[in-house]
């Protein structure tokens, strides 16, 4: 089963580590720099490669010199891509990591990114349509370049559904509000995004289940940061919690979680095993600078500490 991962606003990232208190707060000197390609879709692709899953394509929208740098780095890492080119320049993001005096903080500086023209957006939709094959899994994850509207994403969702594919979605804001009107196999959303988009409380299982059923979402996963996640399907409700991990670099943990979940489900694993894998990937991610960067050993160390149980009360809506 092939996976197409929509990655509409990729970036080239610099992670700059500052490991001692600066003499002057307005002059920061990094001691270590980590360069990586980023964007939620590319983070998923990086985890796929780490675990040896190769039947996927990251479909990127790239532009300019930075776009060429992203393309080159993907080739170096073995991340499989299909790239659509626009005239404007792809973005560079910077993470400032302060790791001294017994505390760690990460400050992300994200550029606004390029702007695609209407003709480029329409051409991209034709480009994506030509890539689609019956039976594909389409992963829609993250934001899009300026000029790419929520209605354009709806066009892609509508097109995908007409091609007998499954949608796995991790987006937010207006994009999320619009796409849930199409059948979704897996919707992964964090509790803040859920509240902002639909005024839903992650603690109200009845409301979550009602929402899932009304929107024809096969599986709803609500992530809760360090508190784990809740998963609701027709058959079962699970609560899963990560182990305590020595690390503070949470950027990319949600993408790692989603990738770990998809890896297991694509292999035919149970929902339970898929959630265990997802949670271990999300936890392992916090151990290293950068997004979706962790070893298999770190994954297995985390997997042994994941806790999962079935929720047996509270779903009164179904009765």
Image (cartoon, helix red, strand yellow):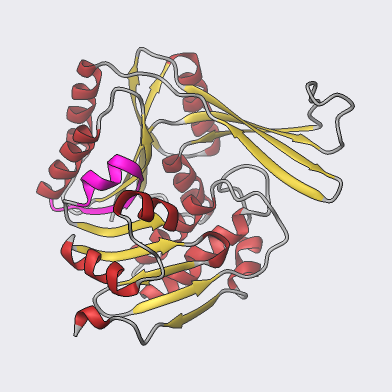
> Which quadrant of the view contains residue 32?
top right
Which image quadrant for residue 258?
bottom left
Q: Is residue 101 above or below residue 37?
A: below
Say if the magenta span includes residue 213. Answer: no
Residue 263 position (above or below residue 101): below
Q: Position of residue 170 (x, y in %)?
A: 36, 50
Q: Position of residue 106 (x, y in %)?
A: 67, 41
Q: Which residues are magenta?
A: 164-180
* Residue at image coords 58%, 71%: 303
Q: Nearer the viewer, residue 97 or 272?
A: 97
Q: Nearer the viewer, residue 79 or 192?
A: 192
Residue 313 appears left or right of 225: left
As for residue 166 lying within the magenta part, the answer is yes
Q: Is residue 126 left or right of residue 109?
A: left
Q: Residue, x 18% and y 34% (percent of image)?
A: 130
Q: Choose between 181 and 40: the one closer to the eye.
A: 181
Residue 243 % position (x, y): 63, 70
Report the front residue among 127 and 275.
Answer: 275
Where residue 287 sits, quadrant-wise, is bottom right
- The reply to whether residue 254 is in sight is yes
Q: Can see residue 269? A: no
Q: Is residue 255 left or right of residue 99?
A: left
Q: Residue at x 41, y 70 (%)?
A: 203
**Which residue is at a point 86% across and 30% down the rendered structure image?**
22
């Amino acid at each position: 089963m092939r996976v197409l991962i929509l990655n509409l606003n990729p970036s080239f990232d610099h992670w700059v580590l500052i490991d001692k208190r600066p003499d002057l707060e307005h002059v920061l000197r990094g001691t270590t720099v980590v360069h990586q390609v980023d964007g939620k879709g590319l983070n998923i692709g990086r985890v796929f490669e780490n675990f040896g899953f190769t039947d996927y394509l990251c479909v990127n929208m790239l532009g300019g010199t930075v776009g060429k740098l992203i393309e080159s780095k993907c080739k170096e890492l073995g991340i499989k891509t299909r790239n659509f080119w626009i005239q404007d320049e792809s973005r560079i993001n910077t993470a400032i990591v302060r790791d001294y005096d017994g505390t760690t903080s990460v400050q992300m500086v994200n550029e606004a990114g390029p702007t695609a023209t209407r003709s480029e957006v329409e051409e991209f939709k034709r480009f994506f349509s030509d890539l689609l094959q019956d039976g594909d899994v389409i992963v829609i994850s993250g934001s899009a370049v300026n000029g790419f509207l929520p209605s354009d994403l709806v066009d892609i969702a509508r097109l995908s559904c007409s091609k007998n594919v499954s949608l796995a979605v991790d987006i937010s804001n207006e994009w999320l509000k619009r796409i849930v009107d199409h059948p979704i196999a897996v919707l992964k959303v964090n509790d803040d995004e859920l509240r902002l988009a639909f005024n839903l409380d992650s603690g109200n299982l009845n409301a979550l289940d009602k929402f899932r059923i009304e929107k024809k979402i096969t599986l709803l996963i609500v992530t809760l940061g360090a508190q784990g996640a809740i998963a609701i399907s027709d058959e079962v409700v699970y609560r899963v919690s990560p182990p305590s991990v020595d690390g503070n670099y949470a950027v990319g943990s949600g993408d790692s979680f989603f990738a770990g979940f998809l890896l297991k489900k694509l292999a035919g694993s149970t929902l339970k095993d898929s959630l265990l894998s997802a949670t271990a990937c999300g936890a392992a991610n916090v151990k290293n600078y950068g997004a979706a960067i962790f070893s298999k050993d770190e994954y297995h160390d985390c997997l042994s500490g994941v806790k999962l149980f079935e929720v047996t009360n509270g779903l009164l809506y179904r009765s």
